[in-house]
Image: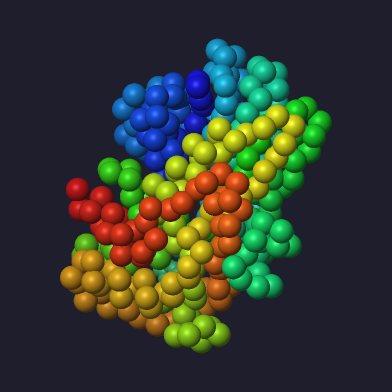
């Protein structure tokens, strides 16, 4: 298929673009490089530097589908500057959907998030759980999911949203490279690399077995593969939503212990107060995507996720 990958110079987008190229698709990456890196665009993909609001010019060349990753994704920033999230994530996507309609592109796979659910009533979280985002980032992604349902009904769009839990690991040279790093695993590995003295643990008084937060870590290669399955499964006039996680939770302490094992570094940890807005436990039910699309993660241990992240960091 001829495919556009918006945000294909970012972490998840670059891995999906690489897997699409490997699967024989004709891939164009559209990325404004506001947070992405030009050298993350995989060999074999064409790169167009630009914003999603300018997608129509490229889409007019004739495309079979769009995989949409370009977005702002920092929870803290979204609380401080919500307007950025509404204009980029919702406004930008509405412009992209309009460009798709005008150019006759009828298929989209959208990068959504577990942040659409907010504080869960129970875990593991199924797709039928109430959506009550606790920050503008999650709210803006949920608004796009809502628009996709409406556009599928109104215009026959074929859409799939994938709601990611905690994405980690690396795919070959493609790894997480954020200017402002907020995620746990890269922050812990920075200590092992000697770039930081210690890792801060945000809260040890949660109602969990060891008092630290529990998250569901999914390997970026497994996550990316789900996008290729979703692309094939897109059906006209339908919008399907799938959660993507391993279905197993690991605590912050467990993550740090595995990082110590993998790196052989002592990785000092400093325990501090909770980070506002962090739910105690977030674990996905990914039964639906396993059942309907046949998705199975290859990497179910934290060890293999951390090992791949560590190998890519050292390259
Ligand atoms: N966390 C931490 N120290 C850090 C970064 C994260 O203790 O330097 C904790 C955070 O409070 C949460 C978990 O690790 O409980 C995962 O956070 P991350 O930002 O990686 O992902 P999130 O679950 O917020 O999407």
Say left or right for 93 vs 26: right
Instruction: Judge whether residue 178 can be spotted in this image.
Output: no
Vertical placement of residue 12 versus 19, above or below: below
Identified at 30% across, 75% down, the residue is 257
Identified at 64% across, 22% down, the residue is 105
Say left or right for 19 vs 235: left
Say left or right for 219 vs 138: left
List x then y, in percent, for residue 132: 72, 62
Dividing the picture into quadrants, the one containing residue 29 is top left
* Nearest to the observer: residue 275 or residue 254: 254
* Nearest to the observer: residue 242 or residue 294: 294
List x then y, in percent, for residue 301: 36, 64
Dividing the picture into quadrants, the one containing residue 264 is bottom left
List x then y, in percent, for residue 229: 52, 39
List x then y, in percent, for residue 311: 23, 54
Residue furthest to the right in view is 154
Vertical placement of residue 82 versus 185, above or below: above
Dividing the picture into quadrants, the one containing residue 101 is top right
Instruction: Judge whether residue 114 can be spotted in this image.
Output: yes
Say left or right for 233 vs 15: right
Identified at 61% across, 71% down, the residue is 123
Coloring scheme used: rainbow
């Amino acid at each position: 298929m001829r495919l556009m990958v918006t945000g294909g110079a970012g972490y998840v987008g670059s891995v999906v673009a690489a897997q699409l190229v490997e699967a024989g698709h004709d891939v164009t990456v559209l990325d404004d490089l506001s947070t992405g890196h030009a050298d993350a665009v995989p060999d074999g993909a064409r790169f167009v530097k630009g914003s999603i609001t300018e997608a129509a010019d490229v889409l007019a060349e004739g495309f079979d589908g769009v995989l949409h990753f370009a977005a702002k994704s920092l929870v803290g920033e979204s609380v401080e500057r919500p307007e950025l999230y509404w204009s980029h994530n919702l406004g930008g996507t509405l412009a992209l959907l309009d460009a798709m309609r005008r150019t006759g592109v009828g298929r989209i796979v959208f990068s959504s998030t577990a942040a659409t659910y907010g504080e869960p009533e129970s875990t593991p979280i199924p797709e039928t759980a109430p959506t009550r985002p606790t920050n503008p980032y999650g709210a803006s992604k949920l608004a796009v999911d809502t628009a996709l349902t409406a556009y599928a009904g109104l215009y026959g769009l074929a859409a799939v949203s994938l709601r990611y839990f905690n994405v980690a690991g690396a795919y070959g040279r493609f790894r997480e490279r954020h200017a402002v790093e907020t995620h746990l695993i890269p922050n812990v590995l920075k200590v092992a690399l000697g770039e930081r003295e210690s890792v801060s643990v945000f809260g040890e008084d949660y109602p969990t077995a060891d008092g630290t937060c529990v998250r569901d870590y999914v390997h970026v290669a497994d996550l990316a593969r789900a996008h290729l399955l979703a692309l094939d499964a897109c059906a006209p006039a339908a919008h399907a939503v799938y959660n993507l996680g391993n279905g197993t939770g690991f605590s912050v302490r467990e993550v740090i212990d595995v990082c110590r094992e993998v790196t052989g570094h002592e990785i000092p940890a400093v325990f501090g107060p909770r980070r506002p807005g962090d739910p105690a436990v977030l674990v996905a039910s990914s039964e639906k995507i396993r059942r309907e699309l046949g998705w199975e993660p290859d990497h179910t241990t934290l060890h293999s996720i951390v090992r791949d992240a560590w190998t890519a960091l050292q390259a």
